[in-house]
Amino acid sequence: MLRQLKTFFDKHFNNDEISAEEQQKQLNIAVAALLVEAVLIDNQTESSELERLKNILKTTYQIEQAEIEELISISEQELESSTDYYQFTQLINQHFERTEKLTILKQLWQIAVADGNVDVHEEHYIRKIADLLFIPHSDYIKIKLSITEI
């Protein structure tokens, strides 16, 4: 997938026997990678989207500021070669319940609308992630409408 993002991911989590704390950290980083892509997918990094992303990562996923900055930097460098999100969504699917996946979808929409404009690339990306997370289309539409009609 994303070479440098994969290296970052492996650096933090390349261990077969990990503690519950480390496993949670892996999950947080997997979610973070998906959220970072939501900011970058339209090739316009808006400050409002970036601030919303940082707030979500810090408050919801307890990712440290240095890791947030590193993830953003790596994703920006590798966005052009992005072809697959499976390694992240697979990890999320293995460990997250339906409600947690719906929260991720909601956060993706919150980032997309943060600048007041949902780009076609953002919408396509969010739909793709919803499919990879096995979120039913009806839930996708409900969440989209709840966020975009605010």
Image: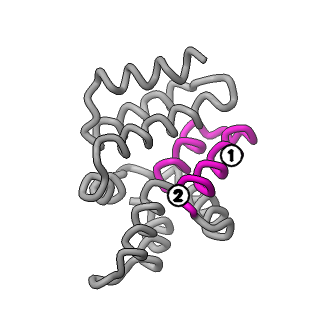
Looking at the image, residue 66 lies above or below residue 47: below
Q: Residue 32 lies in magenta, yes or no?
A: no
| Residue hosting label 1 | 50
Magenta-highlighted residues: 33-62
Instruction: Work out which quarter of the rendered image holds the N terminus and state it.
Output: bottom left
Q: Residue 56 lies in magenta, yes or no?
A: yes
Q: Tell me: 41 left or right of 31.
A: right
Residues marked 1 and 2 touching at CB (< 8 Å): no
**Nearer to me, 150 or 85:** 150
Mark number displayed over residue 31: none
Spot occupied by residue 106 in the image (x, y as percentages of width and height): 47, 35
Q: Secondary structure at mark 1?
A: helix
Q: Secondary structure at mark 2?
A: loop
| Residue hosting label 2 | 61
**Nearer to me, 123 or 95:** 95
Q: Amino acid at mark 2?
A: Tyr
Instruction: Work out which quarter of the rendered image holds the C terminus and state it.
Output: top right
**Mark 1 to mark 2: distance in Å?**
16 Å
Q: Amino acid at mark 1?
A: Leu
Q: Earlier in the sequence, mark 1 or mark 2?
A: 1
Looking at the image, residue 118 lies above or below residue 32: above
Spot occupied by residue 71 in the image (x, y as percentages of width and height): 58, 62
> Which SS does the magenta portion mostly show?
helix
For the point 31% across and 52% down, the residue is 96
